[in-house]
Amino acid sequence: MTDLKSMTPEELSVYFKELGQPSFRTMQVFRWLHQGARSFDEMSNLPKALRERLKEDCLLTVPEVERKQVSKEDGTIKYLWRLFDGNCIETVLMRYKHGNTVCVSSQVGCNMGCVFCASTLGGKVRDLTPAEILDQVIFTQQDSGETISNIVMMGIGEPLDNFDNVLRFLTLVNHPDGLNIGMRHISLSTCGLIKQIDKLAPLGLQLTLSVSLHASNDETRSRLMPVNRSVGVGPLMEACRRYFETTGRRISYEYAMIDGVNDSDAQADQLAQLLQGQPGHVNLIPLNDVAESPLKPSRRVRQFQQRLERHGVTATVRRKLGGDIDASCGQLRRKHIQQQ
């Protein structure tokens, strides 16, 4: 089956030309797909014969809401979407003063093994297609009735482990005839896959790269993030320097604050040393409790932040949203799997 929604307009143009269709069909169909058409029958400005052909030959991805939780505290909405093959993924809509942000998943499950994250429990099942990543933005907007202005790729999965599909998604969501969300309004999070960071840099995308650091030395980071055993903090920071030198884009470093593990003054000093001479921003994240994990939220977030600031490091504390609705990445999917 042909996945039209994963195609760029240029590819759609070739497809419709091969069907003997006029060139204007390309943007007609592209706009229908990006407006969230749920069937080819909805595409009322297409001839019936073409609609029937598309129904026979093409896949139209439409995720279904398996579960939806709305926070009574701040209005955050967490979706558990059921995909065409029965797998489930999570998407979160967060409301800020500057606009609405959607956090999307890039894979079903995750292979990275970070011990503080529920997404990785059970490993990776498969990559999401560009259409399935795009659907999270389209149908979250459609279901909530809210306009989405910002995207963070920080949901289930490692985006750079699904490199080609993620790049295709970025091209599609940025298209002026589609959702038209600018690259400067998109953040892409990675646990630090060096080869892929080096592959991303020369593309010159104006997105924000967020590196999940979470520790300032190899011993602690390897304990928290198995990927570090093959990467290492030093080589990762060198890759980050290369990325900045190539793109001129400041990197955001994610740092989950874990009680008694990575929140000491000594580790704050180490972190400041790592970032010396490199423009960057540290985003301190109050840890969400995961039932299967013994790790607990730090009680020293403010002290850690102040210590970094005394070293001249820009550090902010992420606002905690959706604390009453299984806010931690992967929790809702994990509960669903257990119940099944």
Image: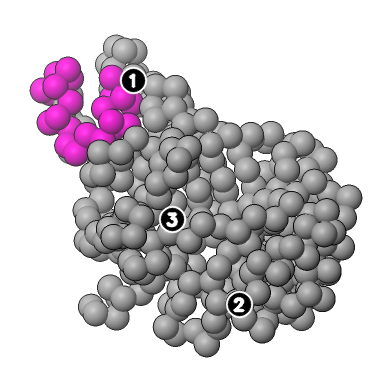
**Which residue is under mark 3?**
105
**Which residue is under mark 1?**
26
Q: What residue is rendered at 44% in x and 65% in y?
A: 329
Where in the figure is residue 58, as x and y percent of width and height?
Answer: 25, 38
User: As shown in the figure, which amino acid type bears the numbered disc 2?
Assistant: Arg
User: What is the quadrant of residue 24 in the picture?
Assistant: top left
**Residue 130 in sight in this render:** no
Q: How far apart are marks 3 and 2 (CA)?
A: 29 Å
Task: Identify the secondary structure beneath mark 2.
Answer: loop
Instruction: Specify start and end residues of the magenta stretch as a single range.
Output: 28-49
**Residue 73 in sight in this render:** yes
35 inside magenta stretch: yes
Asked if marks 3 and 1 touch (Cβ < 8 Å), the reply is no
Q: What residue is rendered at 45% in x and 40% in y?
A: 97
Q: What residue is rendered at 33% in x and 20% in y?
A: 26
- Please state, as top left, top right, bottom left or bottom right, where the C terminus lies in the image: bottom left
User: As shown in the figure, which amino acid type bears the numbered disc 3?
Assistant: Ser
Residue 299 disc label: 2
Q: How far apart are marks 2 and 1 (CA)?
A: 55 Å
- Badge 1: few (under 14), some or many (20 or more) residues near its Cα, within 10 Å? many
* Nearest to the observer: residue 292 or residue 273: 273
